[in-house]
Amino acid sequence: MQSAITTSKLIKMKEDGEKITALTAYDYLFAQMVDQAGIEMILVGDSLGMVVQGKATTLPVTMDESIYHTEIVARACKYAMVIGDMPFMSYQGSIDEALKNAGRFLKEAGASAVKLEGGVAVANVIEKLVKTGIPVQAHIGLTPQSVHQMGGFKVQRDEDRLLEDAKRIEDAGAFSVVLEGIPSDISKKITAQLQIPTIGIGAGLECDGQILVLPDMLGVNYKKVPKFVKKYADLYTDITKGLSQYSKEVKEGTFPSKEYEYK
């Protein structure tokens, strides 16, 4: 496998027109598989609140929970850049608090970067983190931590605001930006105007890269998934089938058979 992904490599990929792949992961086992598959970025998203913990939104996720999951993901990775997702209210209160919390992802969890949501409103935070030596991935468009303010998970169509957000976070020093829930024509304009890579999720083909939530794209999540999710496997069906077969064989007394016994 090639040497580990860095921010400079990601920017070079954009310059060369090479698409970037990214996925979420929350534990060692899946992170190891994602890393070995050659995915460039793993985001330990605050989506763990919904995917792992079964909550309705990402808002309840704590710093300690985020650090825990990021640390076990980082331990599995040799190639992918691991990005810790800063949870709600870990950076909005003050720059000093944001700096302290972001630093934990690098010092305690072994991440290479952090992600935070927002554009113009958090540009000063991004600038401070970057000047301190903490790489930052920005996130604009549909930002789940603002779900109540937005009135739900809605596509974002304010082109002028989105372009302003994108330019401001680039000026602040972000090395990439996630574009979520944005019409493809707007994402195309943003991507063309930025020097840093755009990573789309529900933002069309013209972004420099794509990210999906791992359990969604592997078909582990049996619940309804967003329109932009393509399922590349149906693990929920395969896993539940295997579990049912195991239960049946144990109850019938056919497992373990002789071939699984020690002599």
Image (cartoon, rainbow, N blue to C red):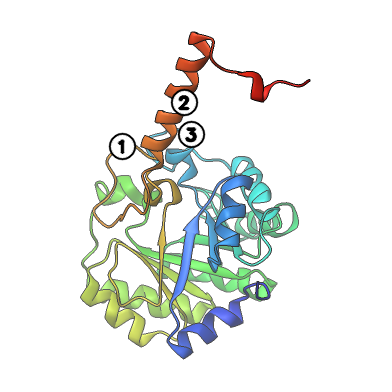
Q: Would you name the residue on which mark 3 appears?
A: 53
Q: Nearer the viewer, residue 259 or 43?
A: 259
Residue 27 appears at what percent x and percent y? 60, 45
> Dot 2 surroundings within 10 Å: few (below 14), some, or many (20 or more)?
few
Residue at 47% x, 81% y is: 196
Dot 2 or dot 3, earlier in sequence: 3
Relative side of 249 to 210, left or right: right
The secondary structure type at the circle numbered 1 is loop
Q: CA distance from mark 2 to mark 3?
A: 21 Å
Q: Nearer the viewer, residue 159 or 68?
A: 68
How many numbered marks does the figure carry?
A: 3
Q: Is residue 41 above or below residue 167?
A: above
Q: Quadrant of the C terminus?
A: top right
Q: Nearer the viewer, mark 1 or mark 2?
A: 2
Q: Would you name the residue on which mark 1 appears?
A: 223
Q: Amino acid at mark 3?
A: Gln
Residue 74 visible in the displayed image: yes
Residue at 45% x, 83% y is: 18
Q: Would you name the residue on which mark 2 appears?
A: 243
Q: Quadrant of the N terminus?
A: bottom right
Residue 126 appears at what percent x and percent y? 54, 69
Q: Amino acid at mark 1?
A: Lys
Q: Is residue 102 above or below residue 200?
A: above
Q: CA distance from mark 1 to mark 2?
A: 19 Å
Q: Using the image, tell me which numbered label, if any, was put on residue 204.
A: none
Residue at 74% x, 52% y is: 108
- Marks 1 & 2, CB-CB < 8 Å contact: no
